[in-house]
Image (spheres, rainbow, N blue to C red):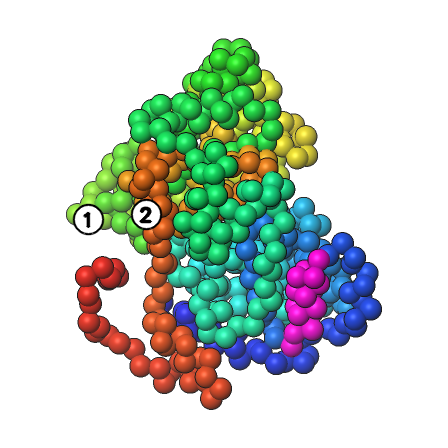
Amino acid sequence: MLTIEREVIERVLAAQNQPEVTAPIREHHLRRYPELNVDQIGVLRDALLSHDQVFGIQGKPGTGKSYPLASIRDLAEEHGYRVRGLGPTSQATKGLRQAGIDSETLQMHLTRPQSSDRPTLYLLDESSLASSKQMREFLRSLQSCDRALLIGDTGQHQSVEAGRIFAELQDAGMRVARLGKILRQKDEGLRLAVEAATDGRIEEALRLLKQQGRIHEIPEREERLKAMAHDFAVGQDSALLLSHDNFTRQDLNAASRAELQKADRLKGESRELGILLTRQDVTGADRERAVSYQPGDTIRYRKGSNRLGIAAKSYAEVIAVDPERNLLTVRQGERYQTYDPSTVKGVSVYETARRSFSVGDRIQFLQKWDDHSISTRDLATITELDRHGNVRATLEGSGRTVKWNVSHYRHIDHAYAMTSYSAQGATVDRSLIHIDTGSGVDQTTLKVALSRARFDAHIYTDSTDRLLAAVSRTNGKTQALSPEQVAQYRQPERVRAEHIPIQHTQEVSYGHAIGF
């Protein structure tokens, strides 16, 4: 990780002040966009006048980062650039597509070699969600004439995998343009509370929300979830239930379905279906260790294995686990085989869960589905469902209809509730936020969840007395290089990475986390 972080920082800083990587613009170009505010015009100017191959756009949630991106695309294409959007999540790519930018996930982009007969301008949205390793691979893929805009907010969620590279690049001296004027919130009281929260003034944000009647104390968890589900079901606007963890998300989905059934918004008989959920506790190197698997798990082989005769994108069920010899036994149809999981790359691990679905249920797709041009986290409403598992659903946004049998695609779940992490980048009319003061919530959870809403947001908590302490916590994402090592890159006579000493042993005090 030390090597990766140093390489990323040095690639970005070494490509600063490169006249050949930018196309000239004139002030009269900026007058073509009267719909942009002063902040957005500033971003447009700074991004396109910069002579840095990699440039950052740091914007608080709801500041309208997508608006100048469409203008940047127009001007860049006029000056000979091909413009491509990238995002670490499907939610991020969806926002870019809404701005009229041809986009795909960063992961998909990195799976194939890049070549073009003209320079490319890449717009990488939600850059804080990109891991250090992904950022390194992305920068390595850039041609000398390409440019990249890294767009995001260091105050929101960071990548699941190691690193906080977007913030680290800014600390090291990557030049950025900043957006600070919040536009998303149309309710003045809510906007003031969101501004306070995103500025780190948590006590003031909670005081405003309490004065506005937007904080509800319900000590009993079951009653709290039921109240949230009821308030969700009675509304006719676009609303989202938000939680810190997947366990509560599932309970909120179940409670919401019960309330929707009472309101007669779900039709016909409920059908119980077996779905596949990603095992959140199996990531990275865990997939190479047999002890990480359990009988009954489902494995998806994204790349397949010629040696084992496993096709790409095929599935297998785990039958037995031998931790001592690091072996898995899996079944594909009638075929069984045993192998060492460290020899097979590109796998995903799922557990099976049972869910009840009805006509009228809102669902989300949990896995990209190329056959039907569906992206991860796309939403749909079930319009037909029979006892054989045949489903027809209408996709939100496009109105397109998709039909399938759940035996062929089981990556679906209810979409009434989301974790704040999954919701980053989403915009709804109303957000209903669950905060258990005894769980691992922090400032980022509050900032992201609160800022999703345009018109209204409510917090449901077990204790208003403990709420401030809970959401004032900071949960800093770890990095390999120390802040002092990163800061040395900002010196005028920049110290190169190989001359920065590595502290192999450091004094550790209580309260510091140690990574092995």
Residue 389 coordinates in the image, percent (x, y): 50, 19
Q: Name the residue under label 2.
A: 469
Residue 76 sits in which quadrant?
Answer: bottom right
Dominant secondary-structure state across the stretch colored magenta: helix
Q: Is residue 326 above or below residue 487?
A: above
Whether residue 424 is in magenta: the answer is: no
Report the quarter where the C terminus lies: bottom left
Q: In this view, does 82 lie above or below 160?
A: below
Query: Can residue 271 be seen from the camera position used here?
Result: yes
Q: Residues within 10 Å of mark 2 (few under 14, many from 20)?
A: some
Q: Tell whether 130 sits left or right of 398.
A: left
Q: In the current view of this chain or complex, which residue is farthest to the left?
A: 324
- First-in-chain label (1 vs 2): 1
Label 2 sits on what residue type? Ala
Segment colored magenta = 37-51
Do the residues under discs 1 and 2 have CB atoms within 8 angstroms? no
Residue 279 coordinates in the image, percent (x, y): 35, 40
Query: Can residue 312 be seen from the camera position used here?
Result: no
Front of the two marks 1 and 2: 2
Whether residue 40 is in magenta: the answer is: yes
Label 1 sits on what residue type? Arg
The dot on residue 325 is: 1
Q: In this view, does 479 lie above or below 185?
A: below
Q: In the current view of this chain or complex, which residue is farthest to the front?
A: 211
Residue closer to the observer: 272 or 489:
489
